[in-house]
Each structure stands twice: as C-alpha cells, then as structure tokens.
Image: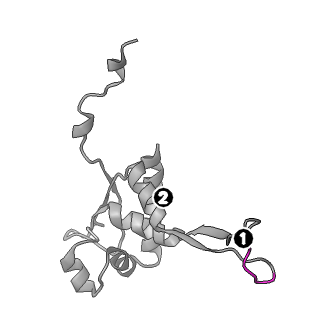
Amino acid sequence: MDFKEFMLPNIKEAKEEIITFKGVETFKDSKGKPIPLDFRKMNRKEYRELIKQFKIRKPAIDDKGDYIISSNNKLVYDEELDTAGLNDAVIAKTMVVPNLYDKELMEYYGVYSATELLNVMFKGDDYDYVDRLSLIHIWRCRR
C-alpha cells in the first residue's frame, strides 16, 4: 500500500474557513438589511482547550453536607462544566463579524472583554439566535 495516498496536498496551507449566517434585525447596513454574521471554524484541539478552561472542580459533598473522603483518605471531587461560559467563549473566539475583540467596539459599549461585549450587543432573541448559531457551528467543526 502506498501511504502517499493518505497525504493531503497543502494541508498546512489550508485557509481558515468562514461561515456566514443571516444577521439579526438589531444591526442593519445603510440599506436597512441585517448585517450578516461571520464565524470562523474552530478546530477540535482549540475546542478541547476551551472546555478545560470552563471545567469547575469542587469537593464532593454527601447528602448530609459532609465532604466525601475516599477509602485512601483523599478528598473526592466533582467536576462540572460552565456551559454558559463555554458557549460565550466559543462565540467570542469564532465570531469574525462583528469582531468582539475590537477595542473601539469595546470602548463604545464600555466593556473590557469579548464575552461582555457579546452579552451587551446581543440580548434576548438576538442572543438566542447567535447562541443557536454557535451550536450549529460547533457541530460542523467537530466532524
């Protein structure tokens, strides 16, 4: 068997793929049409690294409110995932238009981080829409 058949050409030179979605009614261009929202694809490694940042590790507690100790006298921990924080981080890291890391945009809205900007710019139905886009986006990237 010739393993060269498994060597894709230009794999290192692959362009970052941008996915464009319909915009929200809140932000319109000069012609009154919603400005499309662009997202870049996130690779699996990048997504796994983000997940690590949003894992919450805390001591496990039994029904009486006491810490659970293992048979070898070590504290047992529970791990949870801050899914809301993770979703916001995925949106912020992958949204290209608008660029949530833009300093001028942050200054305009009086915020200091991309996730804060996301939550100020996109509220209610707009946020729900962008959040759904991020879920679609994640599943496309995980294939």
Q: Quadrant of residue 126?
A: bottom left
Q: Main secondary structure of the magenta part?
A: loop
Q: Which residue is mark 2?
A: 135
Quadrant in the picture for the N terminus: top left
Percent x, y for residue 131? Answer: 46, 66
Q: Provide the residue span drawn in magenta.
A: 64-69
Q: Can residue 133 be found in the magenta stretch?
A: no
Q: Amino acid at mark 1?
A: Asn
Q: Residue at x 77, y 77 (%)?
A: 62
Q: Looking at the image, is 84 positioned above or below residue 135?
A: below
Of residues 36 and 135, the one drawn nearer to the viewer in this rendering: 135
Q: Earlier in the sequence, mark 2 or mark 1?
A: 1
Percent x, y for residue 65? Answer: 76, 83
Q: Is residue 8 visible?
A: yes
- Mark 2 is surrounded, within 10 Å at the Cα level, by few (under 14), some (14 to 19) or many (20 or more) other residues, namely some
Which residue sits furthest front? 72
Mark 2 to mark 1: distance in Å?
A: 41 Å
Q: Is residue 92 left or right of residue 67?
A: left
Q: Which residue is mark 1?
A: 73
Which residue sits furthest bottom? 110
Q: Residue at x 22, y 85 (%)?
A: 108
Q: Nearer the viewer, mark 2 or mark 1?
A: 1
Q: Are marks 2 and 1 in contact (CB under 8 Å)?
A: no
Of residues 30 and 96, the one drawn nearer to the viewer in this rendering: 96
Q: Residue at x 69, y 74 (%)?
A: 60
The tally of labels here is 2
Q: Looking at the image, is 7 positioned above or below residue 89?
A: above
* Secondary structure of residue under mark 2: helix
Percent x, y for residue 16? Answer: 26, 48
Of residues 106 and 65, the one drawn nearer to the viewer in this rendering: 65
